[in-house]
Image: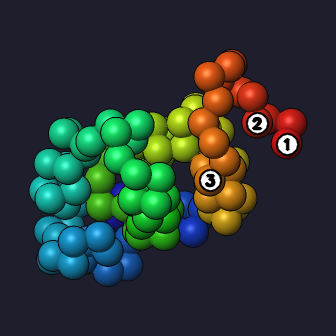
Amino acid sequence: MRAVLSTGRMKPRSALECDVHLVPLSPGEPCAYCLRFLESAPDPDQIPPAVRLDELERWLTATPAVPLELLYRRIEQLVGRPISLHELEDPDLLMRRAQRPRRLGGLYDDFWQ
């Protein structure tokens, strides 16, 4: 079993089903639908903020069925800046930060807020 992120903590996968697409998974295999989406995911700047936040919430609450580096990259795109792994321990705070207007300044503009 591989370790996956669930509610901010690493744990072994317990269900063999993709939480996002609700399709059965083979042990150790990623969700083909998630992979296909992540390979050609829309630019977060081109989708409405509500849709962007819905997608972010879906990735933060689902048990990942894709390689974690792909998941982290998409979460960073949706948030609009690089994230630290410790930020995933508090998905609610990450959601609140993602709701802020995107800034054109430095990557870490909201670090102290």
Quarter that holds the N terminus: bottom left
Front tag of 3 and 1: 3
Circle 3 Cα neighbour tier, 10 Å, few/some/many (<14 / 14–19 / ≥20): some
Query: Residue 8, position in %: x, y?
Result: 60, 62
Q: Quadrant of residue 70?
A: top left
Residue of label 1: 113
- At a point 39% along the width and 41% down the height, the residue shown is 44
Q: CA distance from mark 1 to mark 2?
A: 5 Å
Name which residue lies at 30% across and 61% down: 65
Choose between 75 and 14: the one closer to the eye.
75
Measured from the top left, where is residue 92 in percent x and y? 67, 65
Residue in front for this viewpoint, 15 or 71: 71
Residue in front for this viewpoint, 101 or 12? 101
- Residue type beneath disc 1: Gln
Indicate which label's residue lies in the foreground, 3 or 2.
3
In the picture of the structure, the residue carrying the numbered disc 3 is 99
Which residue ends up furthest to the top in the rendered image?
106
Q: Which residue is mark 2?
A: 110
Tell me the quarter of the picture where residue 24 sits: bottom left
How many other residues sit within 10 Å of disc 2, few (<14), some (14-19) or many (≥20)?
A: few
Q: Is residue 18 above or below residue 93?
A: below
Q: Is residue 56 visible?
A: no
Q: Confirm whether residue 58 shows in the render.
A: yes
Residue displayed at 54% across by 43% down: 79
The image quarter in which residue 110 lies = top right
The answer to whether 52 appears left or right of 84 in the picture is: left
- Disc 2 marks a residue whose amino acid type is Asp
Residue 42, above or below 103 = below
